[in-house]
Amino acid sequence: MCVLAAIRDSWKGVYQQMFDTNHVSNMLKNARVKKNLTQSALAEKLGVTYQAVSNWERGNSLPDISNLPAICQILDVNLYELLGASQDSEFVNKVLSGSYDLTGESIENIVSMAPMIPPEQLITALKNADSPIRDMSVLIQIAPFVDGETLEELGRDVVPTNFGEIIALTPFVSGATCAKWIDMLDSVEECDLDVGFLSALGPFLPTEKMDRLSERVIPDTLVILDSVAPFLSQAALDNLANRLNRISLDDYLVGVQCLAPFLSKEALMKLHQKVVNE
């Protein structure tokens, strides 16, 4: 849960600049019902699949820009009411015109329209924006809409402020980039690292990097180490287990059952002795 909470924290404020997909989905559904149309009927009028309309109304995706005029006409809704966005209307009109001449636009405006701009035009606009990206939250917002190479290029000079931001981007960038961002945090004492963060980073980092990061972690329980065991060397896992301040009998019995294949005999003996002393 700590990992999910950190990722949610790293997204705070991100959607203030982006279309509220929940608003769009609710507007679409309510307007369709008001017009007494089924999802299939609306899909037929728009020339799209039933699944596309279903995804729009569930908030899984946004309609393509080319469909917006027809949607507004069929459902008798205002475009800006449908989008529920606070963007400057002149900018929205520019995007909806299909020209995508976004050179020199602000990062905020470009990112706010990211879900609706074709990737090539989006990448060009981001690279030619009026200022470079300086905030990890912006990278997180555009990550689903650009390729990994572009994301790494745009984030070359961006400095993370917490591990949650890095974890949110791990599926989109290389392990080398994740490692570079982590190195930026190594000297920041207030950036806490726990087992949850460590396990989330595990699939994306080499064992040597994971071992070094594990030195910053003091686990609360033995059983929680099961989530990081596959990503650490035996020596690093032994050290983590040895840093347990205390261990209950239940934690020992369950934890040893999970970790026996990963821990050394010496570490297991020390854990046994710690339980006896408790």
Image: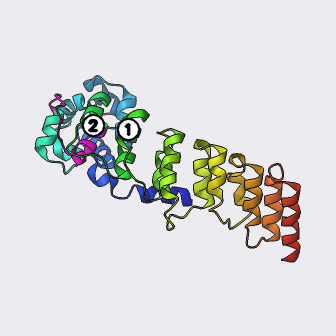
Dividing the image into 4 quarters, which one contains the C terminus? bottom right
Residue visible at 83% across and 55% down? 257
Between 170 and 154, which is closer to the camera in this rendering?
A: 154
Residue 29 covered by magenta stretch: no
Q: Distance between the residues labelled 2 and 1?
A: 9 Å
Between 175 and 259, which is closer to the camera in this rendering?
A: 175
Disc 2 or 1, which lies upstream in sequence? 2
Give the amino acid at mark 1: Glu
* Residue 247, above or below 146: below
How many residues crowd mark 1 within 10 Å: few (<14), some (14–19), many (20+)?
Answer: few
Residue 153 - label: 1
Dividing the image into 4 quarters, which one contains the N terminus? bottom right
Magenta segment boundaries in residue numbering: 97-114
On the rendered structure, is 149 left or right of 210? left
Is label 2 in contact with label 1 (beta carbons under 8 Å)? yes
Q: In which quarter of the image is residue 219?
A: bottom right
On the rendered structure, is 8 left or right of 255? left
Q: Do we see residue 77 in this rendering?
A: no
What secondary structure is found at the residue carrying circle 2? helix
Q: Name the residue under label 2.
A: 127
Residue visible at 32% across and 25% down? 48
Between 81 and 211, which is closer to the camera in this rendering?
A: 211
Residue 104 covered by magenta stretch: yes
How many residues crowd mark 2 within 10 Å: few (<14), some (14–19), many (20+)?
Answer: some
Residue 22 location, x and y as percent? 33, 48
Residue visible at 14% across and 31% down? 97
